[in-house]
Every structure is written in structure tokens, then in C-alpha cells.
Image: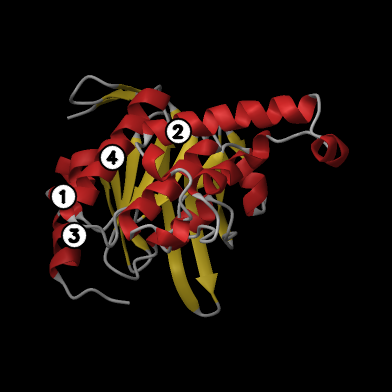
Amino acid sequence: MKDMDTQGYTTADGRKIGGVVMEMKNITLRFGGVMAISNISFDIREGEIRAIIGPNGAGKSSMLNVISGFYNPQEGEVIYKGQKRPQMKPYQVARQGIARTFQNIALFEGMTVLDNVMTGRIRQMNAGLLAQAIWKGKAEREETENREAVEKIIDFLEIQHIRKTPVGRLPYGLKKRVELARALAAEPSILLLDEPMAGMNVEEKEDMSRFILDVNDEFGTTIVLIEHDMGVVMDLSDRVVVMDYGKKIGDGTPDEVRNNQAVIDAYLGVAHD
């Protein structure tokens, strides 16, 4: 059981989690007459792994899209680092230090792993077009620094052996790891993972779970995770928010959520699209 306070909490294994870095307040999102999210509130604390779970069609990806700026809710507020966030485009949210992966892999298939991961460094590329064209001075230093940062991430995720391989030739599990590498290249303070283990076999899931824990531990990255594999969620997460039909039906530690009758009923019922 976690010792909660206004500044943060201590996990069962002794990890220190910081204060609230993002708060979703009374978020409501509609698409025409369809209610995707209905008046949901929860917070995300610095350094934690925060899971969002629920049956198919519960509104999980819609919530992640609100956090990342792909959707703007009709009602409610996103509070980030103590400030109400205005309506933003995804690239503006990315500039605030929020990166994500996607449920459906979104990589450049014809480019190498190295070049795909380099695209995650766009925020760190500030040299002008002329400097880049002649590749001298600031542009050259920037390129060198960015490549060094990318090579460290490639080493960290153990994909050195495929760094020059076109992504289109890779098996599914490795593509997922490359997408994680690209997101990490942006040096995010909050990393959003949309079903990072969907379609993986047991060994691939074990590898991805290890890397997620390592990212959180070594970089201190706050992670928001959507995942259908309940074993993975319960093993990785510090806290879990549960959605069903666009509503929040549970929020707490894995043990608290596991014993929540509303959550049990939702998962024993028929999944809905």
C-alpha cells in the first residue's frame, strides 16, 4: 500500500514518487452525439507509471489523445505543472516535453532504424536552413550531439544490431522497440504508451516490460500506459485508472483496482466496441 501525501507517495518497493505534474479535471469529449469521455478526473504524479485500462471502446485512447493534444475536450481542463493548458496542437504539446507511441505503428518504413530514431530529435535541432545546407559550425555540432544521443538510446534498448536496417524489414516486436526509441529521443518528461505490447509474444512482452521499467528508473520519466494485458499492467503500474463506456469506474493501486467490484464486473462482462 502506498503512503500518499500532497507532495507525492512512496511505493511498496520504496521508490519515491513526486507531486502532481498533470491533472485531468472533469474531462468530457464528444464526437457528434457520441460521448467518448464523460466527466473524468485523475492526476499523474512525477516519476510514476500510471496505467489507463478498460474494455474495448472504453475511451482509453481518446483520453491519451486529449493528453497529447490530438483532441481538445468540450468540457474540463488539463492542468500541466500547475497551469491550465490552453487548446494546443500536438506539436505544441510535444514542445512541453510530452512524447508518445501509437497503437498502430507509425514509423518511416523505408528509412533505417537510426534515421527513424533521429526524427525524434527534431525539437533539439535549432540550426537554420543555411547552416544545415553548408553543415558547418552550429549545424555540425548539433548533428554530432544528436547522433550521440540517438546512439545511446539505441544501445539502451539493445537494437545496435539493426541500427542500419530499414524499418520495413523488421519483425513487429522490433518495430515497437524502434518506436519507443524514437519517442525517447525527444527526451520527454512524460511518455505516453498506447498499447506498447499489443500483438507481441510472451518473450517480446517481457523485453518491453523490462525496457519500460528501465526508462522509468534510469531516466526518471513519468509514464502513462494503456495496455490490455492485465498481468503486465498489475506488474508495472504504480496506480491505475479504469474506464468503461467513457466513465471512470476505478482509480487506485493495482491491488485496490483488482479488488474493485465495478472493475471486476466490467472485465467479466462482454467487451464492447
Residue count near mark 4 (Cα–Cα under 10 Å), binned few <14, some 14–19, many ≥20? many
Mark nearer the viewer, 4 or 2: 2
Residue that mark 1 sits on = 231
Residue count near mark 2 (Cα–Cα under 10 Å), binned few <14, some 14–19, many ≥20? many
The residue lying toward the viewer, choosing from 41 and 121, is 121
Q: Which mark is residue 262?
A: 3
Residue that mark 2 sits on = 153
Mark nearer the viewer, 1 or 2: 2
Residue contact at pointers 2 and 3, CB within 8 angstroms: no
Residue that mark 4 sits on = 239
Name the quarter where the N terminus is drawn. top left
- Of marks 2 and 3, which one's residue comes earlier in the chain? 2
Disc 1 residue type?
A: Gly
The residue lying toward the viewer, choosing from 11 and 179, is 179
Residue contact at pointers 4 and 2, CB within 8 angstroms: no
> Where is residue 22 drawn, in percent x and y?
49, 38
> Where is residue 259 drawn, in percent x and y?
11, 49
